[in-house]
Image (cartoon, rainbow, N blue to C red):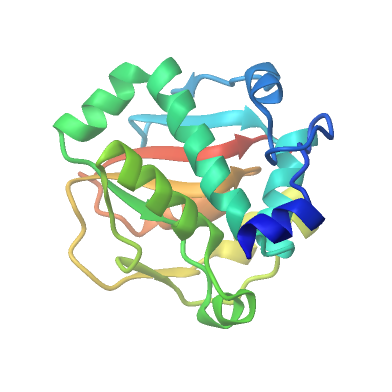
Amino acid sequence: MGIIIDWVFPKKCLGCDVNGNYLCLKCQKETKNLGVSYDDKRLEGRIGLFKYDGTTREIIRMIKFDFVGDAIKETGNWMVATLKKDYPNVVTTWKKEKYVMIPVPLHWRRENWRGFNQSAELAKVIGNKLKIEVNKDLVIRKKNTKSQALRQRGQKSSNMEGAFKIIGKVPKKIIIFDDVWTSGATIKSMIKILPCKTKIWVLTLASGG
């Protein structure tokens, strides 16, 4: 059945429209890598792999709003390949020091409507490939907040105030994972509820906007 669907509705690269994958190898290589940011003293570091525009924006939109499951696996594999190639020392640290990846949760109403949490699904792919533990049940979202992308920058922090709650034992070292970092309000709200001694990395597919 999958072969028939791919034949009738072939996958096309979101960057160049070539058939085969949602992002071809050529466009993957041409997508700018943003590097590591050390601008937050609360963090060990923050990696937003790619700039949030053009192709990456379309990939995230497809995953979140068109419910394209295949795009999650392809995107997760792309992220893993980039991490191994460009951040081998960081990946080694995460594995050696037993960091646990915590995907940013959705409110249960939104997750039920969408049918999945895109960040949790991407984290699962990354965790499986890199042999890093993923815990999607440590933190819950108490507030069903509106999309941060639709708010002005000054409104975003207040929108996220008190949005999250810890319901389990917090590991000493964690990687907070989300699909995109714009103002950072969502992830910063999660960081606020974590113990001060927790070592924290942040990883997102895209950053900017």
Front-most of 158 and 67? 67
Query: Residue 21: image x %, image y %?
Result: 68, 39
Q: Which quadrant holds the N terminus?
A: bottom right
In the image, residue 136 above or below residue 9: below
Q: What residue lies at 15% left-to-right and 30% top-to-bottom?
A: 96
Query: Residue 179: image x %, image y %?
Result: 57, 48
Label count reads 0
Q: What residue lies at 56% left-to-right and 39% top-to-bottom?
A: 205
46 on left or right of 207? left
Q: What residue lies at 74% left-to-right and 63% top-to-bottom?
A: 66
99 on left or right of 126? left
Query: Residue 165: image x %, image y %?
Result: 37, 71
Q: Say which quarter of the image contains residue 99.
A: top left
Determine if residue 7 is in view.
Answer: yes
Q: What residue lies at 69% left-to-right and 69% top-to-bottom?
A: 146
Q: Which quadrant holds the C terminus?
A: top right
Determine if residue 53 is in view.
Answer: no
Residue lying furthest right in this view? Answer: 17
Front-most of 85 and 202? 85
Query: Residue 109: image x %, image y %?
Result: 57, 83
Front-most of 16 and 178? 16
74 on left or right of 203? right
